[in-house]
Amino acid sequence: MSTWIWILIVILALLAGALIGFFGARKYMEKYLKDNPPINQDQLKAMMLQMGQKPSQKKLNQMMNAMKHHQN
């Protein structure tokens, strides 16, 4: 085989590996964030208490719905 064929094979292998790695990592992170959301109601309640607000269940639900809507 000539040299240009080897170079072409190496370049194609690198591109294929990069694409597979990118989409694989993206799929893994989407699944991870779906299974382990970055914030839950308890954390939100603690954060509101630290800011000096008294969180009601209605307000917590509104904030959680707003965050879920913003994620989509």
Image (cartoon, grey):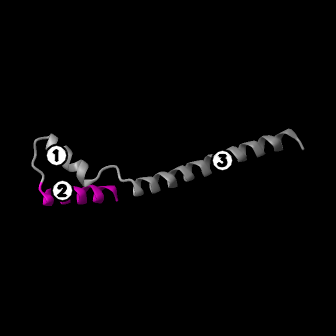
Classify mark 3: residues with Cα within 10 Å, few (<14), some (14-19) or many (20+). Answer: few
Query: 4 or 25, which is in the foreground?
Result: 25
Which of the two labelled residues, at mark 3 and mark 2, occupies the earlier sequence position? 3
Between 15 and 57, the residue placed more toward the observer is 57
Q: In the visual, does 58 lie left or right of 30? A: left
> Which residue position is annotated with label 2?
60
Main SS of the magenta part reads helix
Q: Amino acid at mark 1?
A: Met
Point out residue 37 in the picture as x, y percentages from the top left corner. 36, 53
**Relative to residue 35, is residue 14 drawn left or right?**
right
Sooner in the amino-acid sequence: mark 3 or mark 1: 3
Q: Please name the residue that numbered disc 1 is placed on.
A: 48
Residue where numbered disc 3 is placed:
17
Spatial CA distance of label 2 from label 1 is: 9 Å
User: Residue at (20%, 44%) from the top-left corner?
Assistant: 47
Q: Does residue 59 lie above or below 11 as drawn? A: below
| Secondary structure at numbered mark 2 | helix
Q: Earlier in the sequence, mark 2 or mark 1?
A: 1
Determine the secondary structure under disc 3. helix
Which span is picked out in magenta?
56-72
Q: Residue 69 appears at what percent x and percent y?
A: 28, 60
Residues at circles 2 and 1 in contact by the CB criterion of under 8 Å? yes
Badge 2 amino acid:
Leu
Q: CA distance from mark 3 to mark 1?
A: 45 Å
